[in-house]
Amino acid sequence: MDGDLINEVNMQTQSQVASNMNMQQPIITTPQAMLRQRLYGNANRKVVSEEEQKDVELKLSILEGEIQEDILLYEKRGKIKGKGTVIFRLLTTALAALVTVLLGINLTVFDDMEYIRTPLGQPLSWYANTLAIVISAFLTVIGALRTFLDSNELWVIYTDTVSQFKQLLEDIQYLKIGFNYCTLEDINLLNLEYARIKEDAEGERLKLRMENYGKN
């Protein structure tokens, strides 16, 4: 009798501990996962009417076209930002290194050559200093241009947006396998997800622009 009571208490304790652990673990979900759950989680789907099928087919075709156009658009933007990031960072690094070399040469090589004059009457160190100042000023201009033409963050945003659009197209293709069961509600959910992806991308872009303007 005592053994049965102890076992029952132990089972209740283990159940309570498991329940507490489940409560403590956060439920991690994404908009894409929630969409798929709503699209594919209903086991009692029914064949829709022919009239609704025609409406679904038209709206789905329009939605697919818009998504494909946006994929091309954001891929183009991503390539531009990616190239800008590489060009400006390499240029900035090269010019900064050149300034360091010029200053180093001025302090070491030209230090004992002040007596040597060029055809313009200036010592060699003057040219090194002048060129270093010009390059430093140009680096400041490049830093301002990077705000508009170079943004690694924007490249990441555009790349992620393209990835989400492509995943959405895959969801559409999967849904079309059972096209007879595809409802207008499904299309509305897909359209809402499409709008969310686009709004998030534009929102992140504007937020980044405002941050860059604030820094300047």
Image: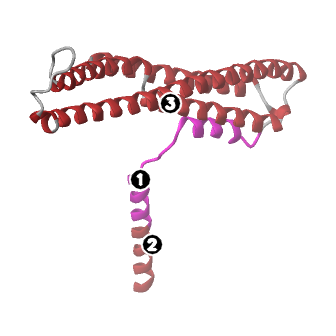
Give the residue type at disc 3: Gly
Where is residue 100? Give x, y as percent.
23, 35
The answer to whether residue 79 is left or right of residue 134 is: right
The disc at residue 132 is none
Circle 2 SS class: helix
Instruction: Name the image quarter holding residue 92.
Output: top left
The amino acid type, in three-letter code, at marker 2 is: Met
Labels 1 and 2: the sequence-earlier one = 2
**Left or right of residue 179: residue 136:** left
Tell me residue 215's x, y (percent): 26, 20
| The furthest residue to the right | 50
The location of residue 14, given as percent across then percent down, is: 42, 69
Q: Nearer the viewer, mark 2 or mark 3?
A: 3
Magenta-highlighted residues: 15-44
Discs 1/2, front: 1
Q: Are marks 3 and 1 in contact (CB under 8 Å)?
A: no
Closest to the observer: 208 or 23?
208
- Specify the quadrant of the image occupied by residue 72: top right
- Residue at numbered disc 2: 11
Mark 3: few/some/many CA within 10 Å (<14, 14-19, 20+): many
Residue 21 among magenta residues: yes
Query: Who's the residue at 76% across and 39% down the image?
Result: 174
Residue 40 shown in magenta: yes
Question: How was the colour assigned to the protein in this rendering?
Answer: secondary structure
Asked if the residue under mark 2 is in contact with the one under mark 1, i.e. CB atoms within 8 Å, the reply is no
The residue identified by callout 3 is 82
Q: Amino acid at mark 1?
A: Gln
Residue that mark 1 sits on? 25
For marks 1 and 2, give the CA distance. 21 Å
N-terminal-most mark, 2 or 3:
2
